Image (spheres, helix red, strand yellow):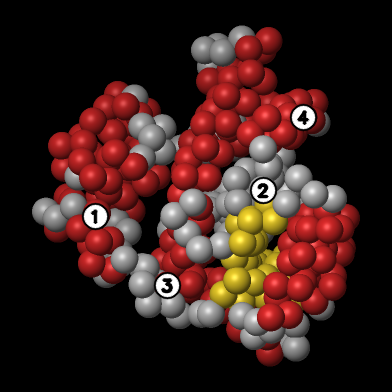
């Protein structure tokens, strides 16, 4: 990867070509999105609208990689620590909240910069979503109970029968999206992949420039390893213990990569000496899925 200052300059030159386009920073976990977004915000007199499905929740601080106090001092962040961990939230609600934030930022003469690794949320802002039924909290709660009782793989097996096209794209551990697929099928009798196929993310609501930082897999692994060790050393296990003690064991963010491994450690399923390797492995798998998704999108890779 190129020096971060070089990346910023490359991005700025591209932004100058389309000065009215919305800037969005996406990419695999641990690739350096926050630092790039903060640096661009400083240069563009901008503010950051987070697109991270874990950072949006309060108390999920260490393992979500929330911006530090220093980074928040350099650039104002929106939609970070905005919700209680038990509050339902999805891509449609995010698109509404992000649009409000972007409009508020613009009215103050600042430039909104969307940044985060939950790419479906970014796409929801840019293109809207398929006209599938809205979230059903009761169904989602039942799915979470079933995943805890029977295992995530059992939920995914049900999706294979209901929507094999969608199931082939989702990892069995991706409980949130597996649940959404089942939810739509249960409500309509029609696969979510069919709804999505009709929509196709073809009609843009915003003209946008999407940037991602190119990291070789080996370099990204090193970054992931360092981050995991740092987070574990600064209290990640205690954070998850406090969340569980506070009644947030069933919060959807608890199924996020890393949080579920720490929870398994607290349940005695993963030894302390095996915890960091388990989180690194899960994070690498997640990053590969993110890259696959991003490779189907029109964006500029920096570095």
Left or right: 233, with 100 as reference point: right
Residue pictured at 37% horizontal, 68% vertical: 201
Q: Is mark 4 in CB contact (under 8 Å) with mark 2?
A: no
Observer-nearest of 128 and 204: 204
Mark 4 = which residue? 226
Observer-nearest of 12 and 163: 12
Mark 1 = which residue? 192
Q: Is mark 2 in CB contact (under 8 Å) with mark 3?
A: no
Q: Secondary structure at mark 1?
A: helix
* Cα distance between the residues tagged 1 and 3: 17 Å
Q: Secondary structure at mark 3?
A: helix
Q: How many marks?
A: 4
Quarter of the figure that contains the N terminus: top right
Question: Disc 1 or disc 3, which is closer to the eye?
Answer: 3
Crowd rating for badge 4 (residues with CA inside 10 Å; few <14, some 14–19, many 20+): some
Mark 3 = which residue? 127
Crowd rating for badge 3 (residues with CA inside 10 Å; few <14, some 14–19, many 20+): some
In percent of width and height, residue 202 lies at: 36, 72
Crowd rating for badge 2 (residues with CA inside 10 Å; few <14, some 14–19, many 20+): many
Tell me if I can see residue 113 in this picture: yes
């Amino acid at each position: 990867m190129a020096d971060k200052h070089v990346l910023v300059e490359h991005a700025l030159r591209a932004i100058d070509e389309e000065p009215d386009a919305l800037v969005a920073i996406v990419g695999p976990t641990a690739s350096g999105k926050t630092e790039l977004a903060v640096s661009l915000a400083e240069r563009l007199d901008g503010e950051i609208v987070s697109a991270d499905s874990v950072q949006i929740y309060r108390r999920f601080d260490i393992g979500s990689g929330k911006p530090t106090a220093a980074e928040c001092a350099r650039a104002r962040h929106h939609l970070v620590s905005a919700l209680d961990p038990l509050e339902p939230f999805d891509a449609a609600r995010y698109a509404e909240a992000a649009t409000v934030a972007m409009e508020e930022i613009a009215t103050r003469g600042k430039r909104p910069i969307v940044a985060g690794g939950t790419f479906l949320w970014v796409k929801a802002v840019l293109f809207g979503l398929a006209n599938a039924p809205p979230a059903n909290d009761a169904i989602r709660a039942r799915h979470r109970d079933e995943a805890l009782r029977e295992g995530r793989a059992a939920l995914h097996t049900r999706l294979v029968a209901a929507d094999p096209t969608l199931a082939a794209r989702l990892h069995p551990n991706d409980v949130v999206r597996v649940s959404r697929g089942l939810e739509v099928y249960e409500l309509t009798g029609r696969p979510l992949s069919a709804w999505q196929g009709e929509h196709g993310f073809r009609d843009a609501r915003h003209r946008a420039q999407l940037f991602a930082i190119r990291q070789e897999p080996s370099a990204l692994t090193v970054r992931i390893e360092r981050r995991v060790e740092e987070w574990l050393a600064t209290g990640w296990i205690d954070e998850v213990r406090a969340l569980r003690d506070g009644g947030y064991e069933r919060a959807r963010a608890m199924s996020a990569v890393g949080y579920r491994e720490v929870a398994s450690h607290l349940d005695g399923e993963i030894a302390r000496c095996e915890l960091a390797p388990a989180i690194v492995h899960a994070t690498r798998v997640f990053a590969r899925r993110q890259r696959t998704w991003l490779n189907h999108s029109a964006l500029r890779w920096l570095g």
